[in-house]
Amino acid sequence: MEANVAMPRLDAGPTLSRKEERQVVVASTLGTLFEWYDFFIYGTLAVFMSQVLFPQDNPTVALLAALGALAVGFIIRPLGAVMFGYLGDKLGRKYTFLITVVMMGGATVLIGCLPTYETAGHLSWILLLTLRVVQGLAVGGEYGGAVIYVAEHCEPRRRGLLTGWIQITSSAGLILSLVVILLVQASMSAEDFRQWGWRLPFILSIVMLAISIYVRAKLHESPVFTRMKQQNRLSKNPVKETFGQWPSLRLVLLALIGVTAGQGATYFTGQFYVMIFLQQAVQLDQTTVYRLILIGFIIGAPTFVLFGWLSDKVGRKWIMMAGLFIGAVGYHAMFNVLLNAGNPALAQAMQTTPVRVHADTSGGACDFGLQAAMIGSHADHKKVCVQAKKFLVGKGINFEYAAPIPGQEIAMSVGGATVNGFDRAAYAKALTAAGYPEKADPARIDRATIILILVLMTAVVAMVYGPVASYLVELFPARIRYTALSFPYHIGAGIFGGIVPFTATYLAQASGNIFGGLMYPVAVMVVVGVIGSLLLPNTRAKAIDEDPAH
């Protein structure tokens, strides 16, 4: 039985009532909510998964490997975008994004059932990687189907507003994931959660999967697709037409390098990497981080709809470009405020009592290559200087290099004391004596300031992410819209954005600077902002039923 959603006349634009609009929006947002819920529970619980599903001879590499598996799921998304984009443009929007939610949700549930490394050896992380590939393929078709389905139902003047509700699911998915994780953690001991409790948020998602399948199975096909099919205007080969004809390919490339790459970098820095930064660099405990993130993102989430609505009034382009430039200019300052508000003792110690590492860096003795981040047995991990550098950055401490001490491969000096060689206990003792805290002092955490910064970060993200769905729908012709929209979005989100957690973590360790991870996303935002400002058209609300002339 299909939902009671009135179909518009084939010779007119969408004429849905407000109630029918809500039904379309709710059905479409459920899948994208599921997508973000999956991403955030994986990313949030990566540290626990790394302790159970990966070998433990090098915990740093295990964590990077877990984040690498997260990145793999994103890197595979463009392939899913092409595959399901083809199906969406040939067979229809409804059935394609019904398939994607089944694949995505099923893989999420199965991640919670994976065997441990202790019981299954390498099979545990191989299965994890396989499921991440399945999820990546499915998500590659999920987002495009959802935003197109909503956009092709609604009135042009409300397109930014209604697709903005899909964009808000990013924060809603995070909020839901944190609520579930906190409730599960509260129901058991810390050791039980570390051993097996982390699985429950994945397994519990079966409820969301069942609801999503039920609601989407009742939907009608998009009126725009129905009209094209009846008028025999469907593309014979949407993949060939998208990538084999220069006018379409040009739009795909413009969308990628003019907005979606920057959108991905902006989003994953301000909505995900910030959680890693607060835990690893600021040294806040996990529960405190989750609670602060929860409050900050709940307050900031409505800005996704706000900027989607505003784009209906003033156009999409310049809101998005402003968000990119504000993020590029402001992110470093925002992260610095988070450090000072979350761990003022650490910030003060780094300012008044700097740490110096005495080593000869000319021969690459302190280089931490990308291969070392991926392979635990790599020789870089055995370098004494690399071990010292990772130890300091892991405690949220910046340092500067100084001339080597004769007869010593490496030494650390702080507060007038010098420790020769590398010894974790001796380093920790010297740092404590110099005023460096082991962890952030809960009594000195400025929670209000942290929440304010998290709200501001969310607003910056929303400036780019809020209008981008309606912008991409309006940019591409209807006959290839599913394929052409999905590909640049998932290159931007999947590759440029999805690798932010791994790349930023690696850059911070490799550079020896806790803010070093921001180099990559800021560079992407600047480049994309310049290109988008110069080359992107500024779309506004317009009819999208016919294939536009570009």
Image (cartoon, rainbow, N blue to C red):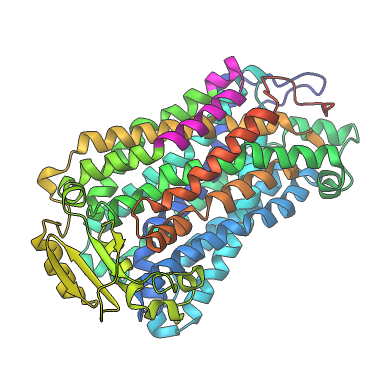
> Can residue 103 be seen from the camera position used here?
no
Q: Magenta segment, principal secondary structure?
A: helix
Along the viewing direction, whichever of 28 and 44 lies nearer the viewer: 44
Residue 249 vs residue 333: left or right?
right
Q: What is the residue that sits farthest to the top in this orientation?
A: 313
Give above or below for 353 relative to 218: below
Along the viewing direction, whichever of 360 and 91 lies nearer the viewer: 360
Q: Quadrant of residue 43?
A: bottom left
Residue 269 vs residue 488: left or right?
left
Q: Position of residue 416 (x, y in %)?
A: 12, 62
Q: Position of residue 50 (x, y in %)?
A: 38, 70
Along the viewing direction, whichever of 374 and 75 lies nearer the viewer: 374
Give above or below for 538 relative to 417: above
Residue numbers of the magenta segment: 309-330
What residue lies at 16% left-to-right and 53% top-to-bottom? Answer: 353
Along the viewing direction, whichever of 146 and 50 lies nearer the viewer: 50
What residue lies at 48% left-to-right and 82% top-to-bottom? Answer: 122
Q: Position of residue 336 (x, y in %)?
A: 30, 42
> Can residue 274 be seen from the camera position used here?
yes
Give above or below for 509 relative to 364: above
